[in-house]
Structures are given as structure tokens and as C-alpha cells.
Image (cartoon, helix red, strand yellow):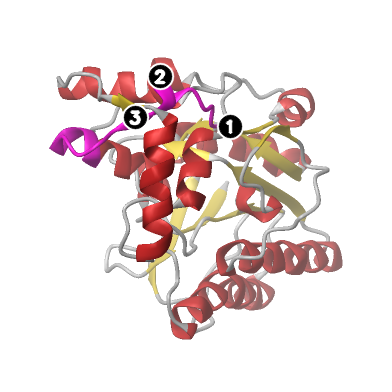
Amino acid sequence: MKLLFTGASGFLGKNVRPLLEKIYEVVTVGLLPQDDYTINIAKEVPVLHDQYDVVLHAAGKAHIVPRTEAEKQAFYDVNLQGTKNLCAALEKSGVPKAFIFISTVAVYGCEFGENITEEHPLNGDTPYADSKKLAEAYLTEWCQKHQVVLGILRPSLIAGPNPPGNLGTMIKGISTGRYLGIADSKARKSVLMVQDIANLVSLLAEKGGVYNVCDSNQPTFRELETIVCKQLGKKLPFSIPYWVAKCMALVGDCLGRCAPINSLKLKKITESLTFSNEKAIRELGWKPLSVLENFQIKE
């Protein structure tokens, strides 16, 4: 079967594509010359030359905090308008049997909580979360109209070689000796091995649905720090007491954006945020990979 893959040159794509190519004939849409269709779908409707059985739409904007109106708008241009442009192209070339969209747990808008399910209200109000929510709603209506099976994945923090985002920040901090644990790093976070996206595609293409996806074991920051330190040959970072971090955060609140920590960042670091993967396991028969056993920080 033919699979159209957007975002194949990103972190997720680089790790998932080799696995997908064992199952599908993969054709990519992206910004690089090596993509089969080199185009910015946020600005243009691509002209597709074939009809595809499955679409995996992973192209998206994330991992930055917007500081200007233009930066905020960029989330909507990429995550929402890019989705609309892709669907417009598919209407001309022939709609697929299944469409799989990589969304995010950020749509729930939760800063902390445990075993949050798909039934939780979609309260995310950042440009990233809101643009993903709007894309989900658009795809739900579009797929119903064209009788396409829709699968929506809401991944948690994604682990894999050279990861972006918070995991990448942790690795860089530990490697440079500029990382401190806080309150023994006891907070738990949901994490997903990037390879599991590939394992989920064929399951979703058949059944569809909306699913949180993460490892069943919710690792603590300390467990993640231990994995990183072991692979880098570094000692475990020193952990400062909560009250010390709280004082630093209060100072950071006064300093503004240039501060390395503030009260909001402290809350995210010291409070658990985990999501339930029970629906995906039950309905798809999916068996998630263990992050603590499989996370390799380098290729």
C-alpha cells in the first residue's frame, strides 16, 4: 500500500520512516530537496500525482514559546492551514482510505494531573494547543464527509535519538554540567518511544479513533536523568531542595523571560503529569515499548 508522509524529515519522521518502509511504499511531503514533494503546505496546496491508501500527517510546529503575534500566527499557519491545504490536495488526487494525524496531549491544557484520559475536556489555549485542536476538529468533519477512517494520536513527551523539546534540554544540560535536579526529581511524566508511532500506524489505519499514546510505565525525572547520565558517562546531577528552587523561582518571576526558572517552570518540574494509554491498549491491541529499556539518546 502507498503511504503519504508529511513531516518525514523531522525528529519523528527520521526515526519512523525506516520502520514504515517495511510495510508501505512511502512518499514524503516536506521542505527538503530529498522529499518526493518539496513544498511548504502551510502556504501552498500541493499537487499530488497519485492516490494514497494512508496519509500520515506529522508535519507541525512545536517546541517554541511564541513571543510575537507573527510567531503565534505561525502555529495556525502550519498546524491548521497546512492541514487544510493537504486535504484540498487529497480531494483532487483521490481521498485515502485512512488519515492519521499526529496531535498532542497539549490539547487538554493540563499542567499537572495523573492518568488523564481522552475524555478530559480540551482546555489547551496556547497557540500550539489551540491550532492542534482546530486541526482535529477540521479533520473530524472532513473525514466524515469523505468517508475516510480518521486516527488521531495524542503523544506525550517523545523519546528517541537526539530528541527536541524538554528531553533535549535535559540531555544538553547534563552533558554540559548545567543541570540540577529539584526535590529529588520525583515527579512523573508520560513518555513515548518514537518507534511506537510506526507500530501504531497500521493499527489505526484499520480502526481509527482518538488515542493518548505513551509508555505504561510513567518514569520519574530521576529515572530519565539516570538513563541520560549512564549513556553520557556523567554523574547524577545534584538535587537542590524544593525551598531553594522556590526562592530562585520567585526571583525569576521578577526577572521575566530571561530567568532560567520561574514559578510556572518550577510547578511543571515538580508536579506529575501523566496520561492514560489504556484505551489504545484495549481497543488497538497495542503493546507500548518501555522507555526505560529502549531510550537511546544518540543514534
How far apart marks 3 and 1 lie (CA) works out to 15 Å
Labels 2, 3: front one: 3
- The x and y percentages for residue 205 are 69, 43
Q: Which residues are magenta?
A: 172-189
**Image side of residue 114 versus residue 145, left or right:** left
* Residue 188 within the segment the image draws in magenta: yes
Q: CA distance from mark 2 to mark 1?
A: 14 Å
In-front residue for pair 124/297: 124
Which residue matches tag 3?
181
Which amino acid, mark 1? Ser
Looking at the image, residue 185 lies above or below residue 198: above
**Residue kind at label 2, given as amino acid type:** Glu
User: Residue 223's mark?
Assistant: 2
Instruction: Name the residue rendered at 57%, 76% in the picture.
Output: 76
Q: Residues within 10 Å of mark 3 (few under 14, many from 20)?
A: many
The x and y percentages for residue 169 are 31, 44
